[in-house]
Amino acid sequence: MTIDEAVTLGELVDLDRYPIDRPDSPAYHDVVATARDGLRAVGCAVIPDLVRPPALDRLGTEIAERKHTTHYSTEVINPYFHVAADPTYPDRHPKNTFLERSSGFIPGDSWEATTAMRILFEQPDLARFLADCLEVPQLHPYADPLAGLTANILDPGQQFTWHFDTNEFAVTVLVEAADEGGLFDYVPNIRSVDDEGFEAIQRILEGGRDGVVTLDLRPGDLQIFRGRYSLHAVSRVAAHSRPRHAAIFAYTEQADVIGRVERTRQLFGRVLDAHVEAEERRVRNDTLID
Ligand SMILES: O=C(O)CCC(=O)C(=O)O
Ligand SMILES: [Fe+2]
């Protein structure tokens, strides 16, 4: 497989084991049922080795070739990505507890239409499979030109501290694992649409491990994760480790959703015209703090 060659779904995904192109097959039904169990119980499902090894190599090469476009930023954030204190809340409160996030994103506009990354992200069969796992009628690739398709880069010494995602769920393919550190930790359903869960969150921010689940993800695994309700973090990659690279695919139930100007600037260091235009006509599903 050369880098310029367009890839097919069968080259990207192990369709014998995971026939995401055949939704009426028993194997499809089984993998969806298992994923639903995980998502219902703990807001997380892992599909082991979904990406075939040659395609995984290609994803690794594509990330390496675009690594110079990574937008790195280090900041101390609360779990809602805010950087400023809120005097209307006590000091020992999640809104006023700030921890280090030092990581980078390769942005959406780094992935040309011919990359295996984008081809996989935009596969209608994959979107339908994910919608079935998440028990929603339909999913669309997140239309944000920077945040829709990204690679999360954690170089040696970096960590992605505890936070909630803006999207209801995210889909991640681990491409390169760290040798030490860089583990995905999460606390299933620590908050819900009608309960912020501040006390439990504060205990985790202060180092508590009650309810923390650590995933043993391997390169090629696909993870479906409800990051809007489950506090999560990627632990610090050790100083002498290889970097950790993960492809992050964002989908939305509604079509044509675009991220906020402020968050976009925070994560990517810039905004596009599309973000400015979308700011006024933005629709949200809930009233939780970002
Ligand atoms: O890299 C990962 O596995 C997840 C990172 C993350 O939580 C995020 O990008 O919001
Ligand atoms: Fe996240």
Image (cartoon, rainbow, N blue to C red):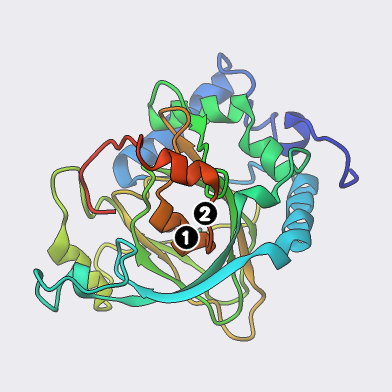
Q: Is residue 180 above or below residue 269?
A: below
| Ligand 1 lies under 8 Å from the Cβ of mark 1 | no
- The answer to whether residue 208 is visible is no
Instruction: Say what amino acid the circle numbered 2 marks.
Output: Val
Residue 131 rendering spot, x and y as whole percentages? 46, 28
Query: How many residues crowd mark 2 within 10 Å: few (<14), some (14–19), many (20+)?
Result: some
Which residue, given by chain and number where applicable, does mark 1 sit on? 265
Q: Is 48 in front, or is 161?
A: 161
What residue appears at the point 72 percent right and 67 percent down from the top-left corner? 68
* Residue type beneath disc 1: Arg
* Mark 1 secondary-structure assignment: helix
Task: Determine which quarter of the picture holds residue 193.
Answer: top left
Q: Is residue 41 left or right of residue 250?
A: left
Please determine whether, in this image, residue 166 is positioned above or below residue 87.
Answer: above
Which residue lies most toward the right here? 2
Q: Nearer the viewer, residue 260 or 151?
A: 260
| Residue positioned most to the top | 24
- Whether 280 is drawn above or below 203: the answer is above
Quadrant where the N terminus sits is: top right
Query: For the image shown, how many numbered marks are present on the structure?
Result: 2
Q: CA gap, disc 1 to disc 2?
A: 6 Å
Looking at the rendered structure, which numbered label has been put on residue 271?
2
Looking at the image, residue 264 sits to the left or right of residue 288; the answer is: right
Residue 231 location, quadrant: bottom left
Q: Give the image location of residue 188, x and y in percent.
A: 30, 53
Q: Is residue 104 above or below residue 247?
A: below
Q: Position of residue 69 (x, y in %)?
A: 68, 63
* Residue at x-position 14% and y-position 44%: 194
Residues at circles 1 and 2 in contact by the CB criterion of under 8 Å: yes
